[in-house]
Image (spheres, rainbow, N blue to C red):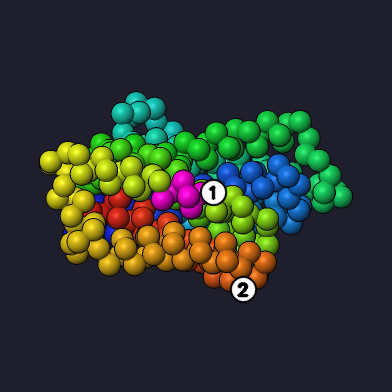
Amino acid sequence: MTVAWGPLLAAYVVLVGLPTGLTLMTWWVGRSGASARLERVGAWGALVALVAISVLLVVDLGRPERFHLMLVRFDNLASPISWGAKLIALKILLLLLVVHAVERRRPPDRPLTRLTRVVAVLLLAVSFALALYPAALLARSWASPLAGGAGVLFVLTALLMGAAVVVLLGGEGRTALLGLLAASAVALAVEALALAGRPDDRLLLAELTTGGSAPLFWGVAVGAGLVLPAAGLLALPRNRVVTALCAVAVLAGAAATRYLLFAVGS
């Protein structure tokens, strides 16, 4: 399988789901009273991951010294790469504000101020935009034909990655993880039916299910990423080791799904 846009952009498409989903899922779990530690670690984790991902974009640009132009110029808004750079820069700024507020808060479980809550709402909106962004980016190119109608799958895989990290951090994300696994299975099935219904897309479906991508699709995206963690969480819901292993499997499966949406057909 060849990847028309190169390994750095493939890594970006896969990894950007992690800080995006982590922000959204930390907020979701926090609605029911997440610990201050989870909130703090989630904010720092999303910030560090997003900065690392930004480095990938800068290097992939080919001329890193011109990257700042993508942030300060607004005459290139037709470029999806420009939108992505601006969204990432905005989210990094908002995360810095949230991290600053969380670190200065005393006591640690004290409620956030109204201004910080406004920043948090903006952060959620930007995070959701970044969850959808890979589908918008790849839909503009012939190189990733599967990605055009896969916005829901990109959002779900980002949320799965975030929920898995929340579980690994000790948060109560098991129920959310199970719900997202079920939703992802349905979304994959609907996507497969849509491909099967269009003659031109049946070759893409065959590449996924019986072709060169089948081992990654069935073995990692579906088997390790959906079936095994769902079975483990349902069979042994209180076993911490099993729960952690299921979370790791979900991360691998979500990453594989995002990669396949990027690479199949390229």
> Mark 2 = which residue?
241
In this rendering, would 129 be left or right of 212?
right
Residue 110 position, x and y percent, is 84, 44
Observer able to see residue 204: yes
User: Magenta part of the protein: which range?
Assistant: 180-185
Label 1: which secondary element: helix
**For residue 168, what is the image quadrant?**
bottom right
- Is 255 on the left or on the right of 38, as rendered? left
Q: Which residue is mark 1?
A: 179
Q: Residues within 10 Å of mark 2 (few under 14, many from 20)?
A: few
**Disc 1 residue crowd, few under 14, some 14–19, many 20+, Cα 10 Å:** few
Question: 100 or 120: nearer the eye?
Answer: 120
Residue pictured at 25% horizontal, 63% vertical:
214
Q: Main secondary structure of the magenta part?
A: helix
Residue occupying the far front of the picture: 235
Which residue is found at the position 31% from the left and 29% from the top? 78
Measuring 74% from the left and 57% from the top, which residue is drawn there?
37
Q: Is residue 85 visible?
A: no
